[in-house]
Amino acid sequence: GAIKVEVYHSGQLGDQKTALLAVMRGDLEMAGDGSPSWFADLGAMPEFGVFEAAYVFKDLDHMYRVMTSKMVQEMFDKLAQKTGLRVLDVWYLGTRQLNLVEKVGPVRRPEDLKGVKLRMPNNKTFLDMGRALGATPTPMAFGEVYMALKTGTIDGQDNPLPTDLSAKFVEVTKYIVLTDHQIGMICPVINEKLWKSMPEEYRVYIKKAMEVARAYMNYTVLEQEAKLLKLFVQQYNMEIIIPDKAAFMENAKKYYSQPEFDKAWGPGMYEKIQNM
């Protein structure tokens, strides 16, 4: 065919940040794992950070209602003009849960996370999310997390359940705490200059392929999430904790009420999105 896609997985071309910067420069044509927090950091567009704040979305339908809205589409256009990153689609990555080592003990409320070193991606949005949950966020590249959990450099991490399995975090941790604190997404991106240079026919093909990939990704993640807790208990001897989610939500609301977030995201944006 006229469009040939070569896939480099598992960080072969560098971590998330490296890949996205390469797409911005035009050294790399596409990347599969853009996200609002990286758009906020790398694109100097802090207003994107709100979409990965703790508890900003109620569920998957709410997330898609917001991310396909006119407001967000206009933000994506501005991102493309400013940075060269054209967002092609939004895929469901899974709902983030806390995943902790045995020495931490059962966590049920935000105060139980006091002093707990929780790994976070090294960008402001995620470091703020760690604090909003009550933990001490520790920035770390994804590829370093398994060994850091094993050696005790960190006390835990947060990811969707399928990621906990595929990255083998379940081998070196004890607890899954069902906080449901983030409806996670990834945003495939393409270099804007390349995108604009393509014939319209090619752009249509790529968008259609993205829709097919989204359907597959979303179905696969939801199917795995429904099955994995049982596997984690039976095969990995993990403990599943049902926390006081209302307490975590209240803690996050209080954290995000600080003036810096209104300044970065726009006045009242956290509540506005919660109510969309």
Image (cartoon, grey):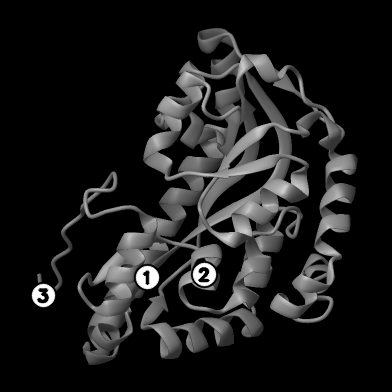
Badge 3 amino acid: Ala
| Mark before the other along the chain sequence, 1 or 2 | 2
* Residue that badge 1 annotates: 189
Label count reads 3
Is disc 2 surrounded by few (<14), some (14 to 19) or many (20+) residues within 10 Å?
some
What crowding class fits label 3: few (fewer than 14 Cα within 10 Å), some (14-19), or many (20 or more)? few
Q: Is residue 155 left or right of residue 245?
A: left
Report x, y in % for residue 30: 28, 68
249 shown above or below 162: below
In this view, the mark in front (1 or 2): 2
Q: Which mark is residue 68?
A: none
The amino acid beneath tag 1 is Val
Amino acid type, residue under disc 2 in the picture: Asp
Q: Is residue 205 above or below residue 258?
A: below
Tell which residue pokes out farthest to the left in this image.
Answer: 1
Image location (x, y in percent) of residue 70: 63, 85
**Label 3 or label 2, whichever comes before in sequence order:** 3
Q: Residue at x 51, y 53 (%)?
A: 122
Which percent across, then down, holds residue 29?
Answer: 23, 72
